[in-house]
Image: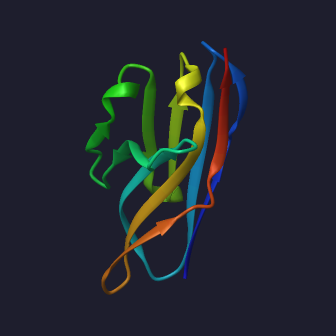
């Protein structure tokens, strides 16, 4: 079994910064892509940023230039540095790990709330 756990959410004023962390743990697996998604009330879950094991990065247009995703493969951990936060960034942020355990699986964390006040 693989567990994915996020941390680092909270309340911040507009223009502020937060750093999210996500760690995958377990045994007998290898991770390909790790990514951050978010879901605001009434909206669908959307991709924020993703990074492959080889370091290829993809960002949503809405966060380009403000968010930075990075990864520590040795720790099976991915980070999301969020700067110049806006009220519209308010959402529950979820981490997803694409894992190979004989076949491919998607594992999701429980989510962490990010609230940006104006």
| Residue at 40% in and 27% down | 63
> Colour mode?
rainbow
State the image coordinates of residue 16 (x, y, percent, origin top left).
Answer: 64, 17
Q: Quadrant of the N terminus?
A: bottom right
Residue 66 against residue 1 in the figure, above or below:
above
Residue sitting at the far right: 11
Q: Foreground residue, 77 or 103?
A: 103
Q: Foreground residue, 46 or 36?
A: 46
Q: Quadrant of residue 113?
A: top right
Residue 64 against residue 20 in the figure, above or below:
above
Residue 76 against residue 59 in the figure, above or below:
below
State the image coordinates of residue 96 (x, y, percent, origin top left).
Answer: 46, 59
State the image coordinates of residue 92 (x, y, percent, origin top left).
Answer: 60, 45
Query: How many discs mark residues in the rendered view?
Result: 0
Q: Foreground residue, 42 or 23?
A: 42
| Residue at 50% in and 59% down | 76
Is 18 positioned to the left or the right of 40 in the image?
right
Residue 66 against residue 89 in the figure, above or below:
above
Residue sitting at the far bottom: 102
Q: Quadrant of the C terminus?
A: top right
| Residue at 67% in and 31% down | 115
Residue sitting at the far front: 42
| Residue at 62% in and 22% down | 17
Is 76 positioned to the left or the right of 101 in the image?
right
State the image coordinates of residue 85 (x, y, percent, origin top left).
Answer: 56, 20
């Amino acid at each position: 079994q693989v567990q994915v756990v996020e941390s680092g959410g909270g309340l911040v004023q507009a223009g502020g910064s937060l750093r999210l962390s996500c760690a995958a743990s377990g045994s007998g697996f290898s991770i390909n892509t790790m990514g951050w998604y978010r879901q605001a009330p009434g909206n669908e879950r959307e991709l924020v940023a993703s990074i492959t094991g080889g370091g290829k990065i993809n960002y949503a247009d809405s966060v380009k230039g403000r968010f930075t995703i990075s990864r520590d493969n040795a720790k099976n951990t991915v980070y999301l540095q969020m700067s110049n936060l806006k009220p519209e960034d308010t959402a529950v942020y979820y981490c997803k790990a694409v894992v190979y355990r004989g076949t491919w699986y998607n594992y999701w964390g429980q989510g962490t709330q990010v609230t940006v006040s104006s």
